[in-house]
Image: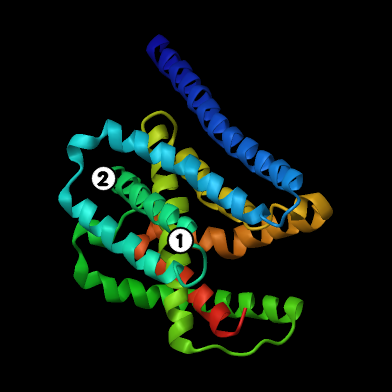
Amino acid sequence: MRNVVLNKNMNNNNFKKYFIYTILLFTIFVLIYIISIVHTLSKQDSGFTYRAWTWTEYYIFCLALIVIYKKFKWLSLRYIALGILLSGISYFSFIQQTDIFTVVTNSIVTFVAFLGGSLLSGGSNRNKSLLILQKHKSLFKSFLIGLIVALPFALINYIYFRLTLGEAEWTNIFSAGFLALAPGISEEIIFRFFTMNFIFYLLEGKVERKYSVIISFFFGIVPHSLIHFPELWIHNIPGALFMLISTSFLFGLPMAFLQYKRNLETAITFHWFIDFIRFFGGY
């Protein structure tokens, strides 16, 4: 009986200790987020989203480097080759949309985050990648599931832009599909594949599985939603709260769920299709 009580106390202490670690990680993100807003206000330009986004990527990049350093002996050439392939596709898609510095840094972060996420994907309670597992025959099925699940969400997203921005001209379907590859690949790798696996790794064996899943989902959803609209907190706090809740539940949660229950490739397809329909519709 005494041993049971001691074990329970140790588990409670572990939970508190590692829960504090996750709070610290999120606090660092919040500080980066706030500083990016304040810095942009001082610059008096429109770079709110750009700074919040890129600075958050740099933060995740540092965490991924730590993982690679700690697990370097398990780093394989296959991980590196796949990382180059995915970040390369993202690069050539993204270069059509912005400046070379932003594209290069994003590609490097994508590559490093993929390596870090892959090194952490070996446990049972992890986000997986079919490419890492070499289950190439399952890629088409995952692609199909991603498309089917994404369809209603893509329509909701398109209708939202249509109602808020007005009618726009349809664009070239192939160009829209190619441009949508960058956000689909890089964002799913950086903000969910690595980030969620990092939290799973941090909490593994330290807290109950259900809590690690909840916390990992939180990290895979909330920061990514927040960096889309940092300037909204200055002018319209209720609107920012609405955007946070709506984007988290309509887009962040399905993508995190697909990564966790299916794989990285299904989530990439889902994300790609959402942006493909938006770009194709002219937004």
Q: Residue furthest top?
A: 2
- Residue 230 seen in the current view: yes
The quadrant in which the N terminus is found is top left
Q: Is residue 247 above or below residue 192?
A: below
Given the image, on which type of amino acid does mark 1 rest? Ile
Which residue is at a point 64% across and 52% down the rendered structure image? 226
Q: Is residue 182 above or below residue 77?
A: below
Disc 2 packing (10 Å; few <14; some 14–19; many ≥20): some
Where, by quadrant of the figure, is residue 260 drawn?
Answer: bottom left
- Disc 1: which residue: 100
- Contact, CB < 8 Å: mark 2 with mark 1? no
- Sequence-earlier tag: 2 or 1: 1
Which residue is at a point 67% across and 86% down the rendered structure image? 168
**Left or right of 107 in this view: 236:** right
Which residue is at a point 63% across and 90% down the rendered structure image? 169
Q: Please tell me whether mark 2 or mark 1 is closer to you in this view.
A: 1
State the image coordinates of residue 93 (x, y, percent, origin top left).
42, 71
How far is mark 2 from mark 1, CA to CA?
34 Å
Given the image, on which type of amino acid does mark 2 rest? Gly
**Left or right of 101 in this view: 67:** left
Q: Secondary structure at mark 1?
A: helix
Task: Please name the colour scheme applied to the rendered image.
Answer: rainbow
- Residue 266 seen in the current view: no
State the image coordinates of residue 150 (x, y, percent, origin top left).
49, 74
Q: Secondary structure at mark 2?
A: loop
**Left or right of 115 in this view: 192:** right
206 or 237: nearer the viewer: 237
Q: Is residue 179 above or below residue 245?
A: below
The quadrant in which the C terminus is found is bottom right
**Left or right of 223 in this view: 107:** left
- Disc 2: which residue: 122
State the image coordinates of residue 163 (x, y, percent, origin top left).
74, 80
